[in-house]
């Protein structure tokens, strides 16, 4: 049995001897290649996307935000930085997600005091106040800044603004932006106040609720202006608003742009239509695109794989966008809202009435000085028990509303 085992072992060694020699040779070459590979990159002068991005990030932000005058979103900063990054890093493509990670890395490392509008990715709803705050960069920053840490003891103020909800007596124009992330820039530039204009935006194609709202406002004489990317998706969104979706009607909204004349001096980016079997130009024509616009969006020389160019709203700096938008709104005669004669008279009468009430409040304040009442320790315990009793009886009450009832007794 032992001789048989030895014979088998010898046969295997003899058969694999040549393979083992070749294997050792290959391993040696692999190690040498790995060493040469590391040596090459150790002394290579090629720069990475990260290195270039960090070098140009400050200038890109300054360009997109007009040196911090306006808020800028991440894609606007990317558009400003991308040409230098691609050229110096010898790359053909820079994805938005990659750049946003680099932007966050830069902010974490240098902590610049930049005004960046990050997209809202959800909401927080406060109990009792019913205040809803979007979980975006500017919304959260403003929300935290306005936190109140004490129970104020201020004299109640009369509201100057008339209590309205909806367009009646408040606005007659709406700006619909096809994507989120621009409301912060527009509100910071005071577009809603300057033009008494409501802002509206959706993610992707509009749903039934958005179409229903636009249709209802149009029935009340409210004009809806649509601001969209110069691309297939942008024109599709415009067409959807005009035709409606299932179970909703379309509305004759006003196309504010981008159109071909708006993008001539803006950087474009390539796009392919891999998921589209048919010639995309046919659909674009049904959206109202001109021949020049179609030939820009879809290369007419392509035959088997449709390709073209697109221009996003982000291609404009914030200042460019604001100035361009103001010019467009002025061209369409968008003006401040002033109600009709009857509502103007009622508003004036209300103002005079409330101003008299305000005068009386000031008189009471001057006479009483609103000195806080001294409360004994045993009374505090009693109040605490009363609050708990009321909250147990009516769990939907807030503690301060319960206090109001106790004080009224």
Image: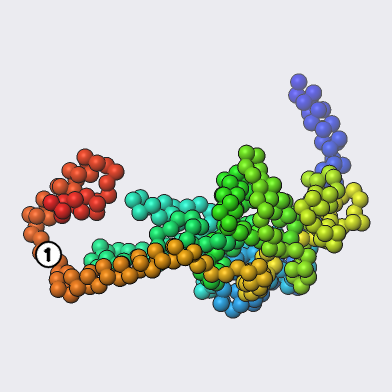
Residue at x 25%, y 72% (from the top left corner): 359
Q: Position of residue 176 (x, y in %)?
A: 61, 58
> What x and y, as percent, mark residue 309?
80, 60
Give coordinates of residue 233: x percent, y percent: 72, 53
Q: Nearer the viewer, residue 222 or 113?
A: 222
Residue 369 horizontal side relative to residue 13, left or right = left
Q: Secondary structure at mark 1?
A: loop
Q: Does the rendering let one see residue 325?
A: no
The residue drawn where x is 47% and y is 61% is 169
- Of residue 145 and residue 229, the one placed in the foreground of this image is 229
Which residue is painted at 78% across and 65% down in the image? 260
Q: Looking at the image, which residue is at 75% across and 24% down?
A: 2
* Residue 257 shows in the view: yes
Display colour scheme: rainbow
Quick one: which residue is furthest to the bottom in this view?
67
Task: Farthest residue to the top: give it.
Answer: 1
| Marker count (numbered) | 1
Q: Is residue 355 above or below residue 245?
A: below
Q: Nearer the viewer, residue 320 or 382?
A: 320
Q: Image quarter for residue 28? A: bottom right
Q: Which residue is mark 1?
A: 373
Determine whether, in the image, residue 207 is placed left or right of residue 113: right
The quarter of the rendered structure image containing the N terminus is top right
Q: Looking at the picture, how far across and down is residue 37, in whole percent? A: 77, 62
Q: Residues within 10 Å of mark 1 (few under 14, many from 20)?
A: few
Q: 363 or 209: nearer the eye? A: 363
């Amino acid at each position: 049995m032992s001789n048989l085992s030895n014979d088998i072992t010898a046969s295997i060694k003899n058969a694999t001897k040549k393979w083992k020699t070749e294997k050792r040779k290959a391993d040696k070459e692999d190690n040498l290649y790995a060493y040469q590979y590391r040596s090459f990159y150790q002394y290579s002068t090629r720069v990475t996307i990260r290195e270039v991005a960090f070098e140009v990030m400050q200038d890109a932000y300054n360009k997109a935000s007009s040196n911090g005058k306006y808020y800028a979103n991440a894609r606007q900063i990317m558009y400003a930085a991308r040409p230098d990054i691609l050229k110096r890093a010898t790359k053909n493509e820079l994805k938005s997600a990659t750049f946003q990670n680099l932007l966050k890395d830069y902010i974490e490392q240098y902590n610049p005091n930049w005004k960046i509008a990050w997209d809202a990715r959800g909401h927080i709803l406060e109990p009792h106040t019913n205040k809803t705050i979007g979980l975006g960069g500017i919304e959260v920053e403003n929300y935290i800044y306005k936190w109140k840490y004490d129970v104020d003891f201020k004299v109640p103020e009369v509201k100057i603004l008339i209590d309205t909800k909806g367009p009646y007596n408040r606005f007659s124009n709406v700006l619909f932006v096809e994507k989120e992330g621009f409301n912060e820039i527009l509100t910071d530039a005071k577009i809603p106040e300057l033009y008494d204009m409501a802002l509206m935006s959706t993610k992707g194609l509009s749903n039934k609720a958005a179409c229903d709202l636009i249709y209802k406002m149009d029935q009340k004489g409210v004009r809806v202006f649509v601001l969209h990317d110069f691309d297939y998706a942008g024109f599709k969104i415009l067409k959807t608003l005009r035709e409606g979706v299932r179970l909703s009607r379309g509305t004759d909204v006003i196309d504010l742009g981008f159109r071909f004349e708006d993008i001539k001096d803006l950087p474009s980016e390539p796009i392919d239509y891999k998921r589209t079997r048919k010639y995309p130009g046919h659909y674009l024509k049904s959206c109202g695109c001109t021949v020049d616009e179609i030939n820009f969006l879809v290369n007419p020389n392509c035959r088997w794989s449709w390709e073209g160019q697109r221009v996003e709203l982000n291609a404009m700096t914030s200042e460019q966008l604001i100035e361009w938008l103001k010019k467009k709104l002025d061209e369409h005669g968008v003006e401040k809202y002033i109600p009709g004669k009857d509502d103007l008279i009622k508003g004036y009468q209300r103002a005079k009435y409330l101003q008299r009430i305000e005068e009386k409040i000031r008189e009471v304040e001057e006479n009483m000085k609103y000195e806080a009442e001294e409360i004994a320790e045993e009374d505090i315990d009693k109040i605490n028990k009363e609050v708990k009793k009321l909250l147990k009886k009516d769990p939907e009450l807030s503690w301060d509303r319960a206090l109001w009832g106790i004080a009224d007794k």
